[in-house]
Amino acid sequence: MVRKSGQTYNARAISGPLGFLQHTPHSLPKMANETVFKRYSGNPIITPSAVPRANSIHNSAIVKFGDGYAGVFRVDEIDFRFVLHVGFSKDGINWDINPEEIRMTPVKPDIPIPARTYDPRITQIEDTYYLTWCIDSPQGPCIGLGMTRDFKEFTQLENIMPPANRNCVIFPRKINGKYAVLHRPSDRGHTPFGDMFYSSSPDLNHWGNHRFVFGAVHGGWQSTKIGPGPAPIETPDGWLLIYHGVWTSCNGYLYYAGGALLDLEEPWKVLARTRDYLLAPTEPYERVGDVPNVVFPSAAVVEDGRIRLYYGCADTCIGMAEAELDQVVRFVKEHSM
Ligand code: BMA
């Protein structure tokens, strides 16, 4: 079966338990110790072949949109410009990615249009989709803010965070009457540290009320740094946050996905946080790529009580894993440190 995006090896189509089409590769045994999240058998779902000038496509944002899905994709091009592309899908698996990069219209003429942009997250608040992403500015990485209602016209607002900050995601509703974000201050390089902070704003422009949320933990998969992943998911047990944790081995960084539950009204209060990871780089497409041994969770779509987690694989392509939302919440509580 020929797929528009993604898979290049031979695949057989079968009906999945949810009616999704699943593709079972013939030859690759699963390497993973999977707990709650199960990888989609046709992973990786999007590869650089989906975009004409892509060297890699990874760490991207996906949301429900209309009767399908929309996404903003990190594309590192063959001249190593990092740009964002919009894409659409009927089923969340097969994607049409626009070959042209997104050109945003700034609300003020002096908002700098960045040359290198990466790691977008999208949050829907009412009928508007807010985009946060990392901008490589001459003074270091900082966080940009954009908005769209239709994924055709994008408006660029004032940057949310000055340098140096590399990860930021907006909560899907106001908390105590204010917009709220989780973000991760960093340095100008590959940042061998990093803790997560909460900030809020009355207008998406002025940010304050900064609170420490949680940080790296000595020893293990989240010992070097952590950073927020997809927009937090509201549950009766708190905000479910899927985040990345990094371990420094003798051979460099490895990226994992973990989960936390944060207080609904005071999200800087951590109710639970996994000591066991949710996902580790174990599959060949997660182990081998431009940056080996990376799973980088960046989007979560919840439908009918199930989460589809989209994640960057080895800074090269995009994978997807699924789980029941209540099982993820239970796992985070039962495997909390
Ligand atoms: C982070 C970002 C990500 C990247 C990750 C792993 O600091 O640059 O874009 O995926 O490192 O390489």
Image: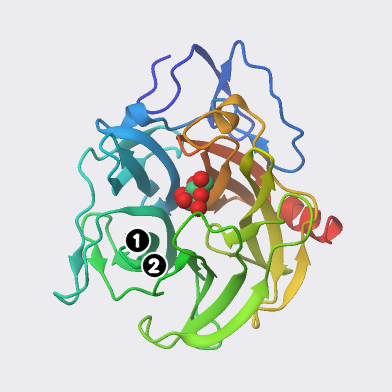
Q: Residue 264 placed where, x, y %?
A: 66, 77
Sequence-earlier tag: 1 or 2? 1
Asked whether residue 178 appears in the rendered view, the answer is: no
Answer with left or right where residue 52 lies relative to residue 192: left
326 up-or-down from 26: above or below = below
Colour setup of the view: rainbow
Specify the amino acid type for callout 1. Answer: Ile
Q: Are marks 1 and 2 in contact (CB under 8 Å)?
A: yes
Q: Residue 286 placed where, x, y %?
A: 58, 33
Q: What residue did someone put label 2 on?
A: 142
In the image, which disc is placed on residue 135?
A: 1
Q: Quadrant of residue 94?
A: top left
Q: Secondary structure at mark 2?
A: strand
Distance between mark 1 and mark 2 Cα atoms: 5 Å
Specify the amino acid type for callout 2. Answer: Cys
Dot 2, how many residues are within 10 Å of its Cα: few (below 14), some (14-19), or many (20+)?
A: many
Answer with left or right where residue 189 lies relative to residue 260: left
Q: Residue 178 placed where, x, y %?
A: 48, 85
